[in-house]
Amino acid sequence: MKIIIAKDYEELSQKAFEVMAAVLDQNPNAVLGLATGSTPVGLYEKMAEDHRKTGRSYKGVSAFNLDEYVGLSADNDQSYRYFMRKNLFDKIDIDLNKTEIENGLAPVAEEECLRYNALLAKTPRDIQLLGIGANGHIAFNEPGTPFDTETHVVDLTQNTIEMNARFFKDISEVPRRAFTMGPKNIMDARRILILASGANKADAVYGMVKGTVTEDLPASILQRHPDCVLIADKEAAARL
């Protein structure tokens, strides 16, 4: 695992952009695995800024997102599809028909998981972007998720529900279930870029990099990936 320590969130976002830009420079038709949450927003801002200033085109790019809430429509302002449009897709020239995310309103969850797995299998990602949770989760794969799991539906933990409540008017509105790529899907990407920001991530980052590879800390599986880059700010990297 390659480790880059940034002095702050701004530098973290810039370093992340440099990794992403290198992939796009090498292949203008790259397949990107993308993530939601607060950590990648700075990266997305820099991708949009680069598009405005340099004219870099995303017309040939395809994108797959990690996860989506069960029960939310794509136009719900708390859905991850909406998040991606607001923070990135509407600011670049990507073809929305080439952007994939699980269907939160799929009538049969198991069939939606199979559909998404089939898409991922036939469209290998050149890079997969990740964040890390304070308990070491990646995407919505909480501690205890088997490493060989593919796209599945998860019951969100109370901690995750409480963490996500800040985005909703009331905690009762937070969905209790979500679709998510599994660890196996994540590990199938050619390159992985994981971002970590803040002191509350320090223990998880330490476990991911230097701890035992265990399903009790899902991010630890990244030790086994042949091309993984961690970019952490000083607070998140404090124990390394």
Image (cartoon, rainbow, N blue to C red):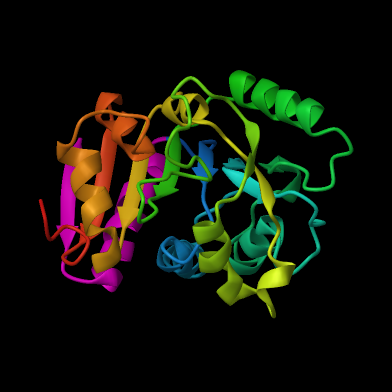
The single residue placed furthest to the right in the displayed view is 107
Residue that appears at 44% across and 33% down: 144
User: Which quadrant of the structure image shows residue 65?
Assistant: top right
Q: Quadrant of the N terminus?
A: top left
Horizontal side of 161 relative to 45 (left or right) equals right
Q: Position of residue 69 (x, y in %)?
A: 69, 52
Horizontal side of 200 relative to 101 (left or right) equals left
Q: Position of residue 231 (x, y in %)?
A: 25, 53
Residue that appears at 28% across and 30% down: 227
Residue that appears at 66% across and 57% down: 80
User: Which quadrant of the structure image shows residue 225?
Assistant: top left
Q: Is residue 224 above or below residue 216?
A: above
Q: Position of residue 109 (x, y in %)?
A: 79, 34
In the rendered image, residue 15 lying in the magenta stretch gets the answer yes
Q: Is residue 9 above or below residue 103?
A: below
Q: Position of residue 199 (x, y in %)?
A: 24, 67
Q: Which residues are magenta?
A: 1-26
Horizontal side of 88 relative to 216 (left or right) equals right
Residue that appears at 51% across and 36% down: 30
How many marks the image carries: the answer is: 0
Magenta span main SS: helix
In the rendered image, residue 82 lying in the magenta stretch gets the answer no
The single residue placed furthest to the bottom in the displayed view is 169
